[in-house]
Amino acid sequence: MFSFFSKPDTRKVLVSGIKPTGRPHVGNYFGAMKQNIAFSNSGDYRSFVFIADYHALTTVKNKEELSKQTVEMVAGYIACGLDINKAILFKQSDVPEHTELCWIFNNIVTVPYLMRAHAYKDHEAKGKEVNAGLFDYPVLMAADILMYGADIVPVGADQKQHVEYARDIAGFYNRAFIKDNREYFKMPKELIVERVATIPGIDGKKMSKSYGNHIELFCPEEELKKTVMSIVTDSSSPEEKKNPDENNIYNIHKHFLSTEEDLLLRAKFENGGYSYKQAKEDLLETIFKWRKGKIDIYMRLVKNPNKIYKILNKGGRIAKTEAQKRMKEVRKQVGLDL
Ligand code: ADP
Ligand code: TRP
């Protein structure tokens, strides 16, 4: 909290959300969570990390599922090392100001503009029903990002367009309501790490909960084994030399490895005599090693979510104070405040 005696916080701002639509998986971790954790823990950013439960409502229609998955996402973040003293960790719906800002933005974006969003077009192309929340998804996400004046938004490649929308919407707003050409809403930038932009799933397509091709980080051992052993491979014999870059097992495994370990693994594929069965067992071993210690933290938190509620409560209060300050200004700028 800023007081007369404390210095204003001049650090750059990081904002990142994750939907509680399932349990955290390898794609979420390497594509977004790992970067969020590293940036937050560095202390170089004012870091707002939240569980996007309003966004999840566009698809989840079961209250037990939604609250359980919210707890699991928070537990996942903490187990993977997020320092809760360095990040403001909260639940989006604890700060309803996000929806208020979204509503204000709704009046400066057009329907044809929203119809160009990839997520909307994908749904349409598949003949799926699109609810109004899903159609408006990018606008709520712009509100999440612009609310706190984000400089960077660490995400996977699939979210690039959403951050572009947030920049557009900042521009629409500044032009519509800020008279002296001042940049009131700052332009956020997506942070996409090229190497991990799209982690493949067990079938080689982008790993995603919605494709059911994901490897959960903290599932029971037997389930993890079953998933890893069902990674899709070609029919090459164990003796054959294999191109690691075209191999699903390698393309998942490499993310867990140091540069030296990666080179050793590449060589195994390239030299031949490395069976897919062995490659899968090695990957399994790596994941078990990676999650050792982490899974205990995860299980403890999930079994006793009181600690999670407390953390979210505290983060929610800090985020809300910020959001209320923002909305006070916005309400004035658009003429809602008499
Ligand atoms: P899912 O596609 O499984 O529903 P989310 O949409 O909830 O995953 O993604 C949460 C975060 O994880 C986003 O920042 C997203 O870009 C990132 N992410 C998800 N899957 C992948 C992946 N396969 N590769 C890279 N990043 C990913
Ligand atoms: N749309 C993001 C996803 O599917 C989740 C999200 C919601 C988000 N609001 C955000 C990500 C703001 C970054 C910043 O993963």
Image: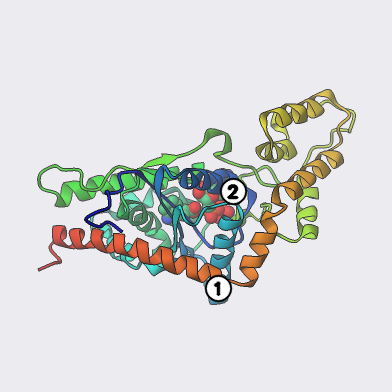
Q: In this image, 6 relative to 77: left or right?
A: left
Q: Quadrant of the N terminus?
A: bottom left
- Which residue carries the number 1 mark? 306
Quadrant in the rendering for residue 212: bottom right
**Residue 5: in sight, yes or no?**
yes
Residue located 64% across and 43% down the image = 200
- Which residue carries the number 2 mark? 29
Residue pushed farthest front?
5
Quadrant in the rendering for residue 278: top right
The disc labelled 2 sits on which kind of residue? Answer: Tyr
Which numbered marker is on residue 24?
A: none
**Residue 216: in sight, yes or no?**
no
Residue pushed farthest bottom?
63
- 197 or 131: which is nearer to us? 197
Query: Do the numbered discs 2 and 1 sit on residues whose CB atoms are within 8 Å?
Result: no
> Residue 18 location in percent, x, y?
50, 56
